[in-house]
Image (tube, grey):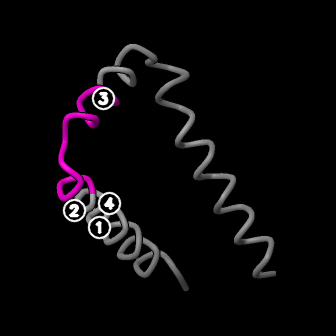
Amino acid sequence: MLENTLFAAIALVFILEGLLPFVFPSLWKRMMFEAMKMTERDLRIMGLVSISIGLVLLLFFSE
């Protein structure tokens, strides 16, 4: 059961990550260009915020 849920979650990540470059490739390229200009500290903060939001949503919607 846990393995199925884990694989489903990973599959959803791939789907969501692929949507933006598929639907809006020029926007995605601009975003990546802007990300290249950011400092490593700022990228880490964005990653931490993203992880935190994901954990809160997971806790909120889990049984």
Give the Cα distance between marks 1 and 2.
5 Å
Indicate the amino acid at tag 4. Gly
Q: Circle 4 sits on which residue? A: 47
Within-10-Å neighbours for mark 3: few <14, some 14–19, many 20+: few
Residues at discs 1 and 3 in contact (Cβ within 8 Å): no
Distance from the alpha carbon under mark 1 to that under mark 4: 4 Å
Residue under the image location 19 percent in, 59 percent down? 41
Q: Main secondary structure of the magenta part?
A: helix
Per the image, label 3 sits on a secondary structure element best described as helix
For this rendering, which residue is in front, 57 or 39? Answer: 39
Q: Are marks 1 and 4 in contact (CB under 8 Å)?
A: yes
Question: Toward which corner of the image does residue 47 lie, by quadrant?
Answer: bottom left
**Which residue does the image show at 18% across and 54% down from the upper left?**
42
* Amino acid on which disc 1 is placed: Leu
Q: Are marks 2 and 4 in contact (CB under 8 Å)?
A: yes
Left or right of residue 63: residue 50 = left
Q: Which mark is residue 45?
A: 2
| x 53%, y 32%: residue | 19
* Horizontal side, residue 8 vs residue 30: left or right: right
Q: Identify the amino acid type marked 3.
A: Met
Which residue was labeled with disc 3?
Answer: 31
Which numbered disc flags the more N-terminal residue, 1 or 3?
A: 3
Q: 48 or 41: which is nearer to us?
A: 41
SS type, badge 4: helix
Position of 36 relative to 42 (above/below):
above
Q: Counting other residues with Cα less than 10 Å from the Cα at mark 1, is it few (<14), some (14-19), or many (20 or more)? A: few
Residue 48 circle label: 1
* Residue 48 horizontal/vertical position (percent): 29, 67
Q: Label 2, secondary structure: give it.
A: helix
Three-letter code, disc 2: Ile
Q: Residues within 10 Å of mark 4 (few under 14, many from 20)?
A: few
